[in-house]
């Protein structure tokens, strides 16, 4: 998404509001993954990394905000179905 969201907005894939909601999260993810000291971390070290924990909290906040504010019923329904599917698979 380095070129921004303009093409996705003009093609009607996402709304301008949806793009604004997810932009900070995408920027934070890119900033994290482009740092050389973060690229080679093991899964275990990533899960203990305070900066990764911050990112996952931001991602959850972004997900919830997008779900609440998107104008796309299709996107909201897809998000709700994904949550339901995740909950079912992890209800063990």
Image: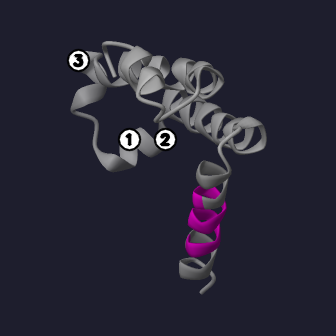
Local SS, label 2: helix
User: What range of the chain is rendered magenta?
Assistant: 78-85
**What's the image's color scheme?**
one colour
Q: Is residue 77 magenta?
A: no
Q: Are the residues flagged by discs 2 and 3 in contact, CB closer than 8 Å?
A: no
Which quadrant of the view contains residue 5? top left
User: Which residue is more in the foreground, 65 or 13?
Assistant: 13
User: Which residue is more in the foreground, 91 or 51?
Assistant: 91
Residue visible at 49% across and 33% down?
52
Local SS, label 1: helix
State whether residue 80 is above or below residue 21: below
* Mark 1 and mark 3: Cα distance apart in space: 14 Å
The residue most toward the front is 11
The residue most toward the right is 68
Q: Position of residue 57 (x, y in %)?
A: 64, 36
Left or right: 33 with respect to 59? left
* Mark 1 and mark 2: Cα distance apart in space: 5 Å
User: Which residue is more in the foreground, 56 or 70?
Assistant: 70
Q: Are the residues flagged by discs 1 and 3 in contact, CB closer than 8 Å?
A: no
Quarter of the figure with the C terminus: bottom right
Say which mark, if any, is on residue 48: 2
Q: Earlier in the sequence, mark 1 or mark 3?
A: 3
Local SS, label 3: helix
Q: Are the residues flagged by discs 1 and 2 in contact, CB closer than 8 Å?
A: yes
Residue visible at 56% across and 27% down?
22
User: Disc 3 marks which residue?
Assistant: 36
Q: Is residue 84 magenta?
A: yes
Say which mark, if any, is on residue 45: 1
Q: Position of residue 36 (x, y in %)?
A: 23, 17
Q: Position of residue 27 (x, y in %)?
A: 46, 17
Magenta segment's dominant SS is: helix
């Amino acid at each position: 998404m380095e070129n921004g969201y303009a093409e996705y907005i003009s093609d009607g894939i996402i709304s301008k509001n949806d793009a604004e909601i997810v932009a900070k999260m995408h920027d934070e993810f890119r900033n994290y993954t482009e740092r050389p000291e973060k690229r080679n971390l093991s899964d275990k070290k990533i899960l203990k990394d305070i900066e990764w924990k911050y990112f996952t909290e931001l991602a959850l906040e972004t997900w919830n905000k997008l779900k609440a504010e998107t104008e796309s019923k299709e996107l909201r329904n897809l998000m709700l179905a994904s949550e339901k599917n995740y909950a079912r698979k992890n209800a063990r």
